[in-house]
Amino acid sequence: MDSSSLTTLPEDETSEQQNQQPSSAFASKPDRPATQSSLQKYSPLEWSGYFDREDDIRIPDTEDVFHVYLGGTEGPVVFCLHGGGYSGLSFALAASKIKEKARVVAMDLRGHGKSASENDLDLSIETMCNDVLAVLKSMYGDSPPAIVLVGHSMGGSVAVHVAAKKSLPSLAGLVVVDVVEGTAMASLMHMQKVLSSRMKYFSGIAKAIEWSVKGGSLRNVDSARVSIPTTLKYDDSKKCYTYRARLEETEQYWRGWYEGLSDKFLSCPVPKLLLLAGTDRLDRALTIGQMQGKFQMVVVRHTGHAIQEDAPEEFSTLVQNFITRNRIGPHGIEIPGFRRPSQSQP
C-alpha cells in the first residue's frame, strides 16, 4: 500500500440533463465525451502482451482458487507477490523482460485480482504465507525448481515471512521492493485516512487508469493500463467501478505484516536484494545489516512506491543481474566446475 497523498481528479460537467433523476453515482455529473487521444492514452491493455499464459490454481480441500500469470520456459522461477490493493499484473511490464532469462509467476493474493477465497478479508500474514506455499505445492509438487521470491510492499512482507519459515527447500533468493519495517510501521496510523481520501468510484476503467497516473500512485501509463483493470470490480448498485480489494476492512492485520520484518529479512539464509525508492527508508537494523554486507541494496531513483511499475526495465535488469551474480540456475545455486548428477534412469 502506498502511503503517499492521493488527490482526486475533477469530473467534467455539462449543462445537459441537469434536471434528470440520477440513475447512478455519476449521473448527476455526466462526463464530456472523451477525445479519441484520451481514450487511447488510458485504454486498458491485455495481460497477454506481457505474460505467456494465465491459470487458476485450486487448493485441495478448500474453496480457494488463486490466479497466476506465467511467462518463460527455462531458468529459476521468479515468483512475484504484489502489494496491497495491486494485483499480479503489477509485474507485467517487468515480466516481459525477466522471462527472457527466467520463468516468471505473478500471483493474485487473496482478496485481490482474479483470485477467490473462502475469506477474502483474512489478510493475516500467516494466512497469506500459507496461500503462497499452497500455490507452490500445487504447481510444483514435492520437487519445485529454484525459487526467487519477489515481493512489493505488503507482498514483500509475505515474501520475507515465507523465506523466514525455511519451509521452502528450493528457495534460492529473495527480492524485497520498497518496504522497510520502520517506515511501514510509522505509516500505519495514516493508512485509513489515505484509503478514505482516494477516489472510490469510476465511471469507466479508463477513468481509473487516468486517476492512478494523474493522482500520483503510478507514474508509468502503460503499466497502469495493464495493471489497474484487475484491481477493480463493477458495482451493479452504483453502476460504476470500485476497488476489488477491501483494504480498509483489514486493519486488524496491518501491524502483523511489518512488525519484526527487518530481523526476519536479515535472518533469511539466502541471497537478498532490497530495492528502495529512497535512502530515507532504511531503519537501524537494516542500516547495520547493509554495512555488514548481509544483503545488497539498490536505490532506484525517480520512481514512486511501485518501482516495478514505474521503472520496469531497470527493475527487470536488477532482478536478472541478481540471479546472474548469485549464480541461481533452474535447480538452485550453480557452483562452477560442479556437475549435478543426471536425473535420467540408468
Image (cartoon, helix red, strand yellow):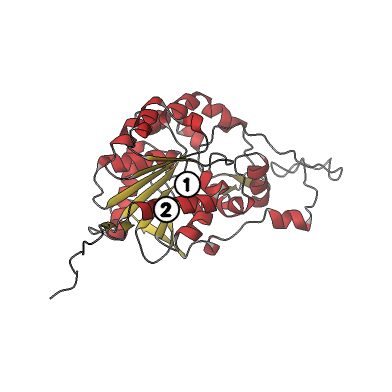
**Residue drawn 52% across and 29% down?**
191
Q: Amino acid at mark 2?
A: Asn
Displayed quadrant of residue 106: bottom left
Residue 294: x, y in percent? 32, 37
**Above or below, comparing residue 253 to residue 168 in the picture:** above
Residue 303: x, y in percent? 57, 41
Displayed quadrant of residue 185: top left
Q: Which residue is mark 2?
A: 321
- For the residue pair 249 and 267, the one nearer the viewer reads as 267
- For the residue pair 20 and 345, the one nearer the viewer reads as 345
Q: Which residue is mark 1?
A: 112
- Image position of 249 (left or right of 127): right
Q: Report whether residue 239 is seen.
A: no
Determine the residue located farthest toward the left in the rendered image. 346
Q: Dot 2, how many residues are within 10 Å of its Cα: few (below 14), some (14-19), or many (20+)?
A: few
Q: Report whether residue 40 is seen.
A: yes
Q: Are marks 2 and 1 in contact (CB under 8 Å)?
A: no
Q: Dot 1, how many residues are within 10 Å of its Cα: few (below 14), some (14-19), or many (20+)?
A: many
Residue 96: x, y in percent? 50, 60
